[in-house]
Amino acid sequence: MEYHGSIASGGVAIGKTFVFAPYVPSVSQRTVTPDEAEGELKALDDAAARAREELTAVVSRLEASDPEKAEIVSAHLAIAEDEELLGEIRRAIAEKHYCVSRAIRETYDEFSAPLRETEDAHLRERVSDMDDVCTRLLRCAEGVPETTLADLPERCIVVAGELYPSDTVLMDPGKILGIVTERGGITSHTAIIAKSCGIPALLGVKDATRLFPTGTEVVLDALEGKVVTETAGETLKCYTALRDRESLRQAAAAAYLCRAAVTKDGTVIDVEANIGSASAGALEAASYTDGVGLFRTEFLYMESSQLPDEETQYRAYRAALEAYGDRPVVLRTLDIGGDKTLSYMELPHEDNPFLGKRALRLCLDEPALFRTQLRAALRASVHGNLWLMFPMVGSLDDLRAAKRAVAEAAAELDREGTPRRADLKLGVMIEIPSAALIADLIAPEVDFASIGTNDLVQYLTAADRLNSEVSPYYQSFHPAVFRTIKTVADAFRANGKDLCVCGELGGNPAAAAALIGLGLRRLSMSPSNVAGVKQIIVNLTVAEAEETARRALSLSTAAEIEKNLTDFVRNKIGGDGAI
Ligand code: PEP
Ligand code: MG
């Protein structure tokens, strides 16, 4: 049988599935008889011992590799071992005759209630630690084994309803052959992470968790967009051959990884990296890219169990700047909201979060949060070539408010005598159509801009980037997208200002050719796309790119444009292109 989905990251994987289903506690309101209480007390002791064992194992595994995370888990261990808390749970069972799950939940709720109320933000953040340990204890009491992406038993294809950024930050990419989810669109953060790790991924496969239970042998064909469950005999042979061919194709493109991205007629294109952290792995891209075109700083916030303080952020930004030396590092200020939430920060419920208080809107509304990030960025600016970029700018009002916040943070540092770079470049993401349409008004007020095609396509086509039900409407090659990019490119060229494309479209070799034809000279992408894009750049002249862009602009539908651009690139690189 074959089951279809949307390709988020290309490739072929063959292996066993692992269904990732985060535990959802079910708390009974049951009371027990005095006779039964004995059994519940024993269940509590067993659960507490199991929780301790699990946490101790995680701490010892993380101590060498990630001391900061180890510290967080140690704090969880301390909560799990807290005798006062355990004593209260025992009393709830023995005296109130609560069943074990009710006793655990109600006691934890009582202990965390004052923390929820407090004005002290740091203490309030402890609530999420308490909730985390409480859930663990409930799971252990139910006898449900832990499933995290942090320690998968073997290399496998992960199958999930949906993967949230908080799940993927824990995953060990080396253990993951592929990803299949029931929900999520091709520019969701799961897709972005899969791409950056070079993991084949298919999203929007209906009923995947039911159809492919843990241990099912499947072929994940993320070239054709399907999961195949008949993996015996000839089928397996064919797919094994396909997987091997795909590896060879990737190897052929890989030969271009470290080449300078110069077109056949000598035009230099800056090929930059999209990164989500300043880890050694992420900064490897410094050896083959011309800068960081997008540092998604929100990952720093999502990986942490509390708001990262100024010093933590400063260290991360400084590491990225030092790795890139004179080359630009575009640091995007916090883009939280939409699909990205923080476990320790309560965001208001919104019916349309992608149209809500997201990114810059949230930062302008939370000046202390914004100020911490801006101070960290400005302090780090003396260590390299930092460009600061604001996401979700829809008007000049947004831009000017953001600039005021930067000026305030800068003035504060100056008063303290803390050094910062005075010639810092400030720019915006063009990802809201209203900003694209006033690109001529924005360009004079910024040093640079970067087109975020992931959101731009979502807002232009009115199709939620995460909702696989509307993925046919989310058309990255829609004529409106190319017309909009042309408008922005013309305005920025007229004003002599730098313009980049940092959405997924920039990392697609077929689209990249057209973007160069529209005048783009900077493209930023997931490191896994760099080789493929450089391969087309060095085989292309600017005149050919311009002709390609003209043709794309003359066509009427997304399908026609995509086919035309893909055929062009295939012809250019002899059919073995990374497309
Ligand atoms: C975009 O919207 O294109 C973009 C690069 O930002 P993100 O995917 O993080 O929203
Ligand atoms: Mg965006």
Image: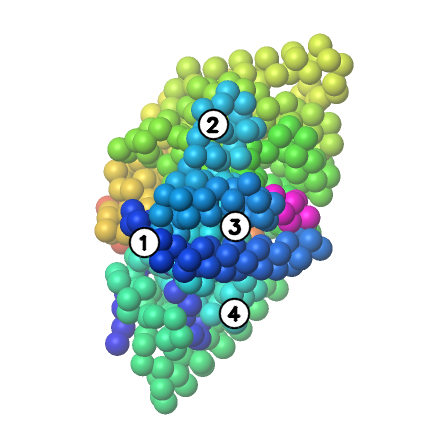
Query: Mark 2: which secondary structure?
Result: helix
Residue 515, above or below 258: above
Q: Residue 169 carries which label?
A: 3
Gap in angstroms between the C-alphas marked 1 and 4: 40 Å
Q: Circle 4 — which element?
A: loop
Q: Which of labels 1 and 4 is toward the front? A: 1
Q: What residue type is labelled 3?
A: Val
Of callouts 1 and 3, the N-terminal one = 1
Q: Mark 2 points at which residue?
A: 114
Distance from disc 4 to disc 3, alpha carbons, whole Å, reads 18 Å
Q: Position of residue 535 (x, y in %)?
A: 54, 58
Callout in the foreground (4, 2): 2
Q: Is residue 477 magenta?
A: no
Neighbours of disc 1 within 10 Å: few (<14), some (14-19), many (20+):
few
Q: What stretch is highlighted in magenta?
A: 67-76
Count neighbours of disc 3 (C-alpha within 10 A) and say few if under 14, some if 14 to 19, many if 20 or more.
some
Q: Which of marks 1 and 4 is nearer the N terminus?
A: 1
Figure quadrant of residue 227: bottom left
Q: Position of residue 331 (x, y in %)?
A: 58, 33
The answer to whether residue 273 shows anywhere in this view is no
Q: Which mark is residue 33?
A: 1
Q: What is the crowding at mark 2: few (fewer than 14 residues within 10 Å), some, or many (at least 20)?
A: few
